[in-house]
Amino acid sequence: MRYYPVNLDIQGRSCLVVGGGRVGARKVKTLLQCGAVVTVVSPEMTSDITGLAAAEKITLERRPYRSSDVKGRFLVIGATDDEVLNQRIHADAERFQLLCNIADRPAICNFTLPAIVRQGDFVMAISTAGKSPAFAKYIRQQLETQFGPEYGTLLDLMGAIRTRLLAEEHAPEVHKPLFEQLIHEDLLGLVRDGDSHRIDRLLERVLGPGFVFDELMSANRLSGE
Ligand SMILES: C[C@@]1(CC(=O)O)C2=NC(=C\c3[nH]c(c(CCC(=O)O)c3CC(=O)O)Cc3[nH]c(c(CC(=O)O)c3CCC(=O)O)/C=C3\N/C(=C\2)[C@@H](CCC(=O)O)[C@]3(C)CC(=O)O)/[C@H]1CCC(=O)O
Ligand SMILES: NC(=O)c1ccc[n+]([C@@H]2O[C@H](COP(=O)([O-])OP(=O)(O)OC[C@H]3O[C@@H](n4cnc5c(N)ncnc54)[C@H](O)[C@@H]3O)[C@@H](O)[C@H]2O)c1
């Protein structure tokens, strides 16, 4: 395995995207979904980028890149097609040992981006270690047909159950078989069917009284706000 897979917490962190074209705009959207504080530096940009700036979701600097732009960032993404500029962004980021991705230039990236399948907090990331981005995209499209919204809902439900059990007692050895039983007894299928009556029966049988689907899901929504 060439690259070390991680899930990076970029919430509230300052991230820079150089280049506001189609590729830059795609990177910006994912950064925002993960709660980053995003600055885009680019003389020209897509309407997505101008829209995000108008809505004050990002800071937009309509000008060419300066080396000082990397200062104080946690993460830098280069998405321009200028090779000399790419090298410069990479060198500037390396000077401060920042996380840096230059689109399509793995030799000057210290992390690469996977193709992503996502349903809520359920995320699958596909890497080919840079061998074939087209294949990563193909697999993403295949997986997207197999993993529907029920996976996000199941995860919210399991998360709410887990939060509640952990609040009562930190006992992984007791909880683990309960989680496994819920999964093996096809809680996912019941969630997919939207059968809250049968979900409640399964929750009661495995976890005991007081675990109710609608209540757990609304507790989940409140904690997510
Ligand atoms: C997954 C995805 C994420 C994203 O970018 O968001 C991503 N590339 C995507 C699409 C895509 N990229 C390219 C094509 C054209 C077909 C093809 O070449 O295969 C397509 C397909 C298309 O656009 O249809 C061209 C390309 N890409 C790289 C090179 C250079 C090289 O390989 O040396 C070249 C040749 C450029 C040239 O000709 O010079 C390099 C990288 N691209 C990566 C990520 C990293 C490795 C990921 C992995 O391990 O697989 C890495 C190493 C660095 C990085 O950019 O992080 C996104 C799919 C999003 C989705 O749809 O889900
Ligand atoms: N990973 C992928 O999926 C993928 C797919 C296609 C292309 N690419 C690569 O991504 C790069 C960008 O692609 P694109 O389609 O978004 O290109 P684009 O031409 O639409 O956008 C390039 C952007 O860079 C900006 N720019 C140019 N000079 C600049 C400077 N000095 N300072 C700041 N910004 C500057 C331009 O204003 C423009 O907004 C290319 O290198 C391309 O090879 C990656």
Image: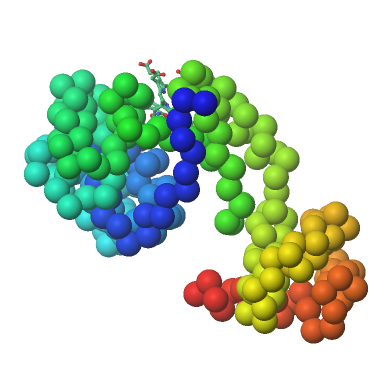
- Left or right? Give the position of 157 relative to 204: left
* Residue 187 sits in quarter: bottom right
Q: Can residue 197 be seen?
A: no
Can the viewer see residue 72? Answer: yes
Q: Quadrant of ligand 2?
A: top left
Left or right: 166 in relation to 71: right
Q: Image height check: is 196 above or below 72?
A: below
Give coordinates of residue 64: x percent, y percent: 11, 37
The residue sitting at 57% across, 22% down in the picture is 135
Q: Is residue 109 above or below residue 34?
A: above
The image quadrant that residue 159 belongs to is bottom right
| Viewer-proximal residue among 78 and 19 | 78
Q: Is residue 164 left or right of residue 28?
A: right
Residue 192 in percent (x, y) is at: 79, 56
Q: Residue at x 56, y 78 (%)?
A: 222
Q: Residue 189 location, x and y as percent?
A: 84, 55
